[in-house]
Image (cartoon, grey):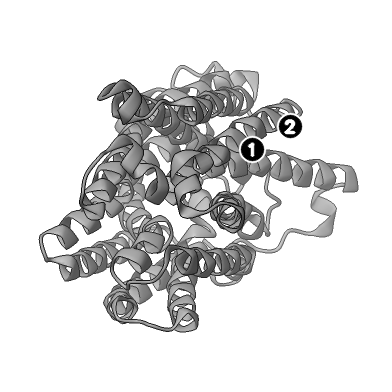
Amino acid sequence: MTTPTAPAALYTGEERSKRIFAIVGASSGNLVEWFDFYVYAFCAIYFAPAFFPSDNPTVQLVNTAGVFAAGFLMRPIGGWIFGRVADRHGRKNSMLISILMMCFGSLLIACLPTYNSIGVWAPLLLLFARLLQGLSVGGEYGTTATYMSEVALKGQRGFFASFQYVTLIGGQLLAVSLVVILQQFLNEDELRAYGWRIPFVVGAMAALVSLYLRRSLKETTSKEMRENKDAGSISALFRDHKAAFITVLGYTAGGSLIFYTFTTYMQKYLVNTAGMPAKTASYIMTGALFFYMCMQPIFGMLADKIGRRNSMLWFGALGTLFTVPILLSLKSVSSPFLAFVLITLALAIVSFYTSISGLVKAEMFPPEVRALGVGLAYAVANAIFGGSAEYVALSLKAVGMENSFYWYVTVMMAIAFLFSLRLPKQAKYLHHDL
């Protein structure tokens, strides 16, 4: 999949600037989408008792993780709907609709009454809001990955496409950073009473800013492509590109699982398993996520040099070998610095995948079904394996089988390696597009 460096004459200065601006515009909206989505995970420790009364903190977290997972179950529907919209009506329109939906979901959560006020309606409305957000982000990933891969500069596609995860991780980082800031000004009781609502309000407001920015994006599809009879067709996708879909599904399953294990679940793991204070866990994750975000362009450039297929193979191999040792070490770690080093090491391994994941997927499909193929394959694997990561881990811990989760992640990484072997050495699509 190695792409030769593009000659300087390939783009005029104006064209180069326009493409870079498009990357910035699309990725800024991506940042807001993922901030809104991840705020839930980082605030769950504080709002869980408000919606799921229980004497057992682990049971409360299992319930909130279940709602988190339910949001993921909407992702395949979102991947299908928004993928079809993107292929038939343009990438830009799809991205505008998804950001509006995310805004509404965040605002709804921010205003929700608690269980003590309206009883069982509280968790049901929380679930509804998360389903809306899951639908939105299910369409966001595929459309943004497709758009950014199409406007990225030839010869540097790994580098520029990596900014999808720079902003995706940036959304996580901003979410956990805001929680850290709130922890400095509000005590535990205040955070549980009302402080957890503040990040959701911030997310809804930021989504409106993103909507304004995305309105200026240039469409990458042509009228002829959008009017193609196969554009956005799920039957055409499975008829002509079934093998590509299965391949993407295969390595995305492991990629999603290990990504959520070492990002959103890791804060709870440090608190609930390693026994660290919530503030300490937040500090560790803030630092680790920052380094992880900075790694993405570096690993994207590396992929431009060694090839996307080789990067994916390194990801699968290293993930298989080091997942269990890292998680076992974190289980008994007492030093915050050592915990930070171990998590950063794990995230470096994950970066072989995340820095180029959207691009590798986009290269597997032609433009008329690209957004649908990328979005649906990602959403299905992400819903089953990524969205359930916290729920499976916490459930196994609750029955005294926590170590089984480590081996589950390891097996999925081995499967990701095997599916990465199916990747072609030279991209069939996108390599010569645009």
Q: Residue at 21% x, 52% y: name it.
A: 56
**Where 302 falls versus 93 (above or below)?**
below
The residue beneath circle 2 is 213
Which residue is at the front of the view, 335 or 93? Answer: 335
Q: Please, what is the three-letter code of the amino acid marked with disc 2?
A: Leu
Percent x, y of residue 182: 58, 52
Disc 2 to disc 1, how far (Cα)?
8 Å
The residue beneath circle 1 is 29
Q: Residue at 61% x, 19% y: name it.
A: 224
Sequence order check: which comes first, mark 2 or mark 1? 1
Is 194 left or right of 313, judged from the image as shown?
right
Percent x, y of residue 169: 55, 55
Percent x, y of residue 93: 61, 22
Q: Secondary structure at mark 2?
A: helix
**Where 3 falls versus 109 (above or below)?**
below
Residue 433 appears in view: no
Q: Quadrant of residue 134?
A: top left
Q: Are marks 2 and 1 in contact (CB under 8 Å)?
A: yes
**Where 322 falls versus 246 (above or below)?**
below
